[in-house]
Amino acid sequence: MNLLSIFLQAAPGGGSSPMMLIMMGVMFVGFYFLMIRPQQKKAKQEKNFQETLKVGTRVVLTSGLHGRIAQVQDDGFVIETLSGKLKFEKAAVSREFTENRFGDKAKATEKTEDKKEIETEKK
């Protein structure tokens, strides 16, 4: 028998069976919970991270550039590096890279800077 004729043969039993529709539904639900939903959750966390960044926070960009946020603008950030100040889009700041590089140190730095700002405001 020819290999092409094997692939072109119809499945025994004729039309679509209800079992086939159930299996397709289960596959779709599986793809949703295993692929689509986690990706949406990750994108939401990334956007929330980028929206909560403040001046003075140390970050790592997707290009690998390390710096400190000097200004927060509507369309992006001005990042201060050792070579000067550069403007980047908000999407360039990576939550994963920043947390892996700085982790708790970035949060501790933010807390000490917040305390300094509060002390200067009181004076």
Image (cartoon, rainbow, N blue to C red):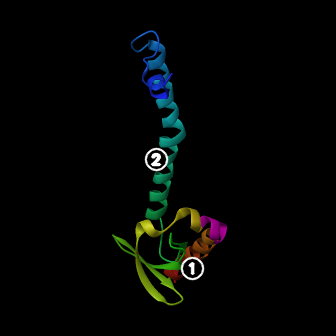
Name the residue: 54% across, 72% down. Answer: 60
- Most foreground residue, 65 or 116: 65
Residue 122: x and y, percent? Answer: 51, 79
Say if mark 2 contacts mark 1, CB within 8 Å.
no
Which residue is at the front of the view, 43 or 68? Answer: 43
Q: Position of residue 118 (x, y in %)?
A: 53, 76
Q: Which mark is residue 107?
A: none
Question: What is the residue that sits farthest to the left in this orientation?
Answer: 74
Instruction: Please give the residue where the numbered disc 2 appears in the rendered image.
Output: 40
Identify the main secondary structure in magenta: helix
Q: Please determine whether, in this image, residue 93 is positioned above or below residue 116.
A: above
State the extent of the magenta-drawn residues as a range.
99-105
Q: Which residue is mark 1?
A: 116
- Element type where label 2 sits in the image: helix
Q: Earlier in the sequence, mark 2 or mark 1?
A: 2
Horizontally, residue 91 falls left or right of residue 97, namely left
- Splitting the image into 4 quarters, where does residue 106 fall? bottom right
